Image: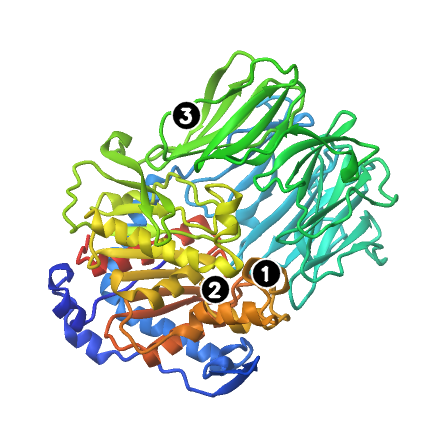
Amino acid sequence: MKNATVLASLCFIFATSCNKKNDSKMSDNIQPPVAKMIPKTLEKFGDVRTDNYYWLNDRENPEVIDYLNKENEYYQKMTAHTQTLQKELFDEMKTRIKEDDSSVPYFLNGYFYLTRFETGKDYPIYSRKKGSMDAKEEILFDCNELAKGQSYFNLGGMSISPDNKMALFSTDVVGRRIYTMQVKNLETGELLSDKIDNVSGSGVWANDNKTFFYVTQDKKTLRSDKVYRHQIGTADKKDPLVFEEKDDTFNVGIGKEKSKKYIIIESSSTLTTEYQTLLTDNPTGSFKVFQPRLRGLEYAISHYGDSFYILTNKDNATNFKVMKTPENATSKDNWKDLIPHRKETLVEDIDIFKDYLVVSERTNGLSKIRIMPWSGKDEYYLPFEIETYTASPTTNVDFDTDILRYSYQSMGTPSSVIDFNMKTKTKEVKKEQAVLGGKFDKNNYTEERIWATATDGTKVPMSIIYKKGLKKDGKNPLLLYAYGSYGANMDPYFSSTRLTLLDRGFVYAIAHIRGGEELGREWYENGKLLKKKNTFTDFIDCSKYLIDQKFTSAKHLYAEGGSAGGLLMGAVVNMAPELYNGVIAQVPFVDVMTTMLDDTIPLTTGEYDEWGNPNEKISYDYMRSYSPYDNVKAQAYPNMYVSTGLHDSQVQYFEPAKWVAKLRAMKTDKNVLYLDTNMDAGHGGASGRFEALKELAKEFAFLLDLEGIDK
């Protein structure tokens, strides 16, 4: 998400899209930094790779920091002429935001809980009111106060004790997702001496109000692997280890069932899950395995009454199904079908109420909410009228209610929180996202769902939005976004910041490519492991379709993706650079080979089921054929803006740094190439809501500058 300028050669080639003020003198006089080459030989299966920039993998090396700073200085100098534009974009986007905003309160254990922002402040305030919204507000955490003196701040998991007197919370002040956990006495406001470092972020209380459980991480790989039990007032004693996950392809999490009867430990990998349960009333007891792990068996559990409800792929249920088992007989042999598997419908989640089972489904790429009375009579789906929407249940913490709370939005409709009465089938909009500034009217925009045909004949959907009156003459700038990994769905969503581009003539599209799960589990399976290249070719084919349909042209087409979507960007610019005038790659995972061969890097071992294990030759050869860093070659590349964070724990900063260094040395064009490193943040970028807008303003300025739009 960032910014750029145009070189003289680009103005010569694409004169119609260049701003004449970007003359050649500026770009001729400012030279990019050149990273020194220190060849390192890497060999596997007889394949020798030479990595000239491996040395950048050391954030403690002053030369590395110096290089990153020089890249930042180069970026700042080259984009100095867009500083005014960036400020204008930031102000415009900020103006649309309701600064004194608050969430829709939810009721839990005698209190209404809400999150709110105050005008001019970056961080949220968490509070509650006892019994009624008219009661006095009790501030739980003012993150603006907690963030003072920090360049980065994030409040992790927050858990209130059953008696409402204590709050368990965690903070990260680096951006590396390594949290410190503390306990706050909500009656006195004091922080207890019970302080625990290196936790994964969340913890859970037992019913005795003095015992809680938490998860720690391996200090080097950052894999969450151990569960401990802590009792208030024992800070001077070593906490007992409850569970250790020794399989380094699994991560551990801990939580509490909606019924509050069980504390659960989840061990999960890409293809396999295992749960353990413990009665909340018995914190010193032993966790019991729900169903022992079997490779390829995925399941999630929900407790209600005397039974567990299981969302699972058991019995080759590719798109998952719902099963039920008695709470005292939890092995898979006791599971019985409740909602059978359907080939055309993906079951994504369930929410249990006293009188209803609510099922989140997806058919033909569209999310659906199914209401199933336990009586078995008159089940129905919530009606939605368009095809570019997203709808899903949100905070539903109460069993004994007829009210389902869900969110709804589309690319042109601001997000709403809706309370739906499942008995009367009536709804109440509790809140619609405010878009300030006085200019927004959703009727001024057109939303469409269109389908491109991939190289292998597969139909790939895209969600698209643009301002009404658009002429399909190939002259419109268009930003195409995608992710395409981990089965993550990039559903159509509303963005007030996106209006900044739409109102300047941009078309915005989301490509729902394989590797996501929009069209069911097979859509994901066909975009991972030895089928990963489908993700890249789908994006390229979507790009070609948009050009063929004259939504845009190669002179005006831009691509954007982050993290694994940054891998996508790296692959497509190697495979089809001629299709794009500019590319934004956010925290991109581009050094696939070296990272996946290094099991000391955070998250690597848990990724084998997503990308393959390169210690196996078939996977090595396949990764080698698409790894963006390893496939950079002497050719022309688009204008590129690459962003990263020095403390990123998901995609290490040195991946994009090495990639940019190699691109600089090998590319044959004179298009701009920027590396912008946030020296204070991690994978998610800046932590404050307004600081994040500044990063977005950089990206938008990069695009607008290439289009010759200076206001």
The N terminus appears in which quarter of the rendering?
Answer: bottom left
Q: Secondary structure at mark 3?
A: loop
Q: Secondary structure at mark 2?
A: loop
Q: Which residue sits at x=60%, y=13%?
A: 377
Nearer to me, 161 or 593: 593
Q: Is residue 296 above or below residue 670?
A: above
The residue labelled by disc 1 is 607
Q: Which numbered dot is residue 589?
A: 2
* Residue at far right of view: 285
Nearer mark to the viewer, of 1 and 2: 1
In the image: residue 431, left or right of residue 223:
left
**Which of the two labelled residues, at mark 1 and mark 3, occupies the earlier sequence position?**
3
Q: Where is residue 515? Give x, y as percent.
A: 48, 52
Q: Hey, what amino acid is under mark 2?
A: Phe
The residue labelled by disc 3 is 384
Q: Which residue sits at x=32%, y=42%?
A: 451
Mark pair 1, 3: CA separation: 36 Å
